[in-house]
């Protein structure tokens, strides 16, 4: 698969998690927290793959890379808002919707504009090789204990419970 296909497929996983999270009723707090944690981790890994591998390789092919970096920072801010709000609070659903819209806006624009430009300008073999690299890096990150720990600490810090106190 081309890098753009690998990243688009991962966008679909993020979309599915956001839809699932948005559909969970307020009384299923544990499930909401589980899906949210999974989503936050997958989104962090997605941004890492793009920031470390994809964006640096396609800067020349698409002027959208600079904007994309800024949008990642905005997504991180909204992730922090959702985590701090927590699944027990009334405002949670609204904040998840804001995050869903922000992810959709960013991912949709990548697919329609940046990925289209990159597919048109970069060599097919280069894109296939980059796709393989991104896929294997994603599997590596998902399997890594260090990454799991780093993401857990990151979530705790964003939630405002860095000492590991129970989340809200
Ligand atoms: Fe992105
Ligand atoms: Fe993306």
Image (cartoon, rainbow, N blue to C red):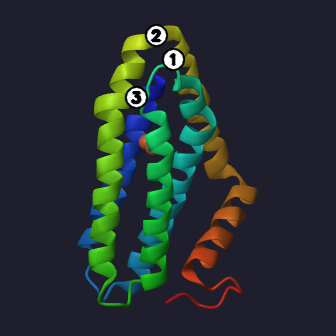
Vertical position of residue 168 compared to residue 129: above or below: below
According to the picture, the residue beneath numbered tag 2 turns out to be 124
Q: Ligand 2, what quadrant?
A: top left
For the point 38% across and 27% down, the residue is: 115
Q: Is mark 2 within 8 Å of ligand 2?
A: no
> Could you give the CA–CA distance between mark 3 and mark 2, rounded to whole angstroms?
12 Å
Name which quarter of the figure residue 8 lies in.
Answer: top left
Residue tagged by mark 1? 128
- Disc 3, disc 1: CB below 8 Å? no
Which of the 4 image quadrants contains residue 95? bottom left
Asked if the residues shown at circle 2 and circle 1 are in contact, with their CB atoms under 8 angstroms apart, the answer is yes
Q: Position of residue 103 (x, y in %)?
A: 35, 54
The circle drawn on residue 48 is: none
- The residue carrying mark 3 is 5
Give the alpha-carbon distance from disc 2 to disc 1, as whole Å. 6 Å
Residue drawn at 42 percent across, 20 percent down: 118
Q: What residue is at 55 percent from the left and 80 percent from the top?
A: 159
Of the image marks 3 and 1, the number of the one nearer the N terminus:
3
Q: Residues within 10 Å of mark 2 (few under 14, many from 20)?
A: some
Compared to residue 137, the image places residue 143 above or below, namely below
58 or 165, nearer to the observer: 58
Residue 12 visible to an observer of this rendering: no
On the image, the x and y values in percent for residue 116 come to 33, 23
Tell whether 127 sits left or right of 146.
left
Q: Is label 3 in a helix, a strand or a loop?
A: helix
- Label 1 element class: helix
């Amino acid at each position: 698969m081309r890098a753009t296909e690998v990243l688009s497929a991962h966008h679909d996983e993020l979309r599915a998690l956001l839809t699932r999270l948005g559909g969970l009723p307020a009384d299923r707090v544990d499930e909401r927290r589980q899906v949210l944690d999974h989503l936050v981790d997958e989104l962090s890994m997605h941004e890492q793959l793009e920031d470390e591998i994809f964006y640096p390789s396609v800067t020349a092919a698409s002027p959208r890379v600079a904007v994309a970096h800024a949008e990642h920072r905005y997504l991180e801010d909204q992730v922090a808002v959702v985590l701090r709000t927590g699944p027990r609070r009334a405002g949670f659903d609204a904040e998840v919707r804001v995050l869903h819209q922000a992810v959709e806006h960013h991912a949709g624009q990548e697919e329609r504009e940046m990925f289209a430009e990159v597919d048109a300008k970069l060599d097919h073999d280069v894109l296939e090789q980059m796709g393989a690299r991104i896929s294997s890096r994603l599997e590596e990150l998902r399997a890594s204990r260090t990454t799991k720990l780093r993401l857990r600490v990151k979530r705790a810090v964003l939630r405002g419970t860095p000492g590991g106190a129970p989340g809200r």
